[in-house]
Amino acid sequence: MVLQILLLIVGFVALILGANWLVDGATSIGIRAKMSPLIIGLTIVAFGTSLPELIINVFSCAKGSSGLAIGNIVGSNITNILLILGIASMIYPIDVSRISIRRDIPAGFVATAALLIMANICIGGDSLTISWTEGLILLGLAAVYLMLTMKKNESPSDEVEAIQIPMPWAKTILFLVIGIGGLYLGGELVSNNAQRIAKSLGMSESLIGLTVVAIATSLPELITSIVAATKKNAGIAIGNVLGSNILNIFFVLGISSLITPLEFDTQMNFTVIFLFIAHALMFLFVFTGKGRKLSRFEGFLMLLAYLGFMTYSILSR
């Protein structure tokens, strides 16, 4: 247990350093490519911070633990919205761009709906499973979303972040490589050891996936968004969360279902529906108050909603 706790600490350190370097490197390369901070968060940073979910799901599916894989993704997405955006907006209010309202938030609803439908309705496989056929559909949706993201960049009027000077190419690449490597290493250390500690405490596999593993694999998004918020880089903060959530369902679950059919526990239906509620709450808060932003108070309410969800999940199982 002592060794596992020490490895957890090492994982946290790797996550913090990796997230900081990744934000700097991604911002630099994005500026060179004339990409907006939002697009940087939705693509480069979102892919980097989704690596822990992808790696854990691949290993879980290879070992036949598909329930853990689905619980990891659904729990991570709820954590990303309520916990991460809640904390980030409490640090610094997050302005939400028009393109996020028109494209990224609706895409999150579509991704959640696709998960709910494919898990409960037979599409090229058994009901209550996500088959390889459905996985190909999810990957196709991921490709469509990424093409729309790259094609429809933001207009300059949507930018709220200050213009920055990019780092030299060598330093930029070094920061990206070390940052993603740090996130991967940290996500692995934290997730593996958190799972072992939870099992030693007698928690079920599905509950582990929904809570401990979901929180652990969301740590890269949490640290990255906190770092971006402290730097007042709201585009990366919200783009990272929205992009990661969409890629978690379309890309990570798509890849996972190609390895093995993902069995769906009907008890997870409530959790997926709650993910809809989390999306709706975020969407509602964007249009309340002054401007299109998530305020500190709204972030606090999102954090309370997350704590309520976690308490219910633990006590009901």
Image: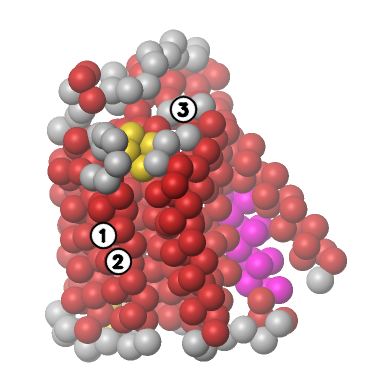
Pointer 1 residue: 280
Pointer 3 residue: 232
Say left or right for 310 vs 149: right
Q: Position of residue 158 (x, y in %)?
A: 23, 25
Segment colored magenta: 184-197
SS category of the residue bearing label 3 = loop
Q: Quadrant of residue 121?
A: bottom left
Viewer-proximal residue among 310 and 121 = 310
Is residue 107 visible to us here?
yes
Viewer-proximal residue among 30 and 203 = 203
Pointer 2 residue: 277
Q: CA distance from mark 3 to mark 2?
A: 27 Å
Q: Residue at x 42, y 14 (%)?
A: 164
Residue furthest right in the image: 2
Q: CA distance from mark 3 to mark 1?
A: 25 Å
Q: Quadrant of residue 4?
A: bottom right
Q: Position of residue 62 (x, y in %)?
A: 47, 74
Q: Earlier in the sequence, mark 3 or mark 1?
A: 3
SS category of the residue bearing label 2 = helix
Q: Residue at x 19, y 35 (%)?
A: 98
The number of callouts visible is 3
| Colour mapping used in the image | secondary structure
Q: Residues within 10 Å of mark 2 (few under 14, many from 20)?
A: some
172 lies above or below 256: above
- Quarter of the image for the N terminus: give it: bottom right
User: Was residue 55 drawn as part of the magenta stretch in this picture?
Assistant: no
Q: Position of residue 236 (x, y in %)?
A: 40, 35
Q: Position of residue 103 (x, y in %)?
A: 17, 45
Q: Main secondary structure of the magenta part?
A: helix
Q: Disc 1 vs disc 2: Cβ atoms closer than 8 Å?
A: yes
The kind of residue on which mark 1 rests is Ala
The kind of residue on which mark 3 rests is Lys
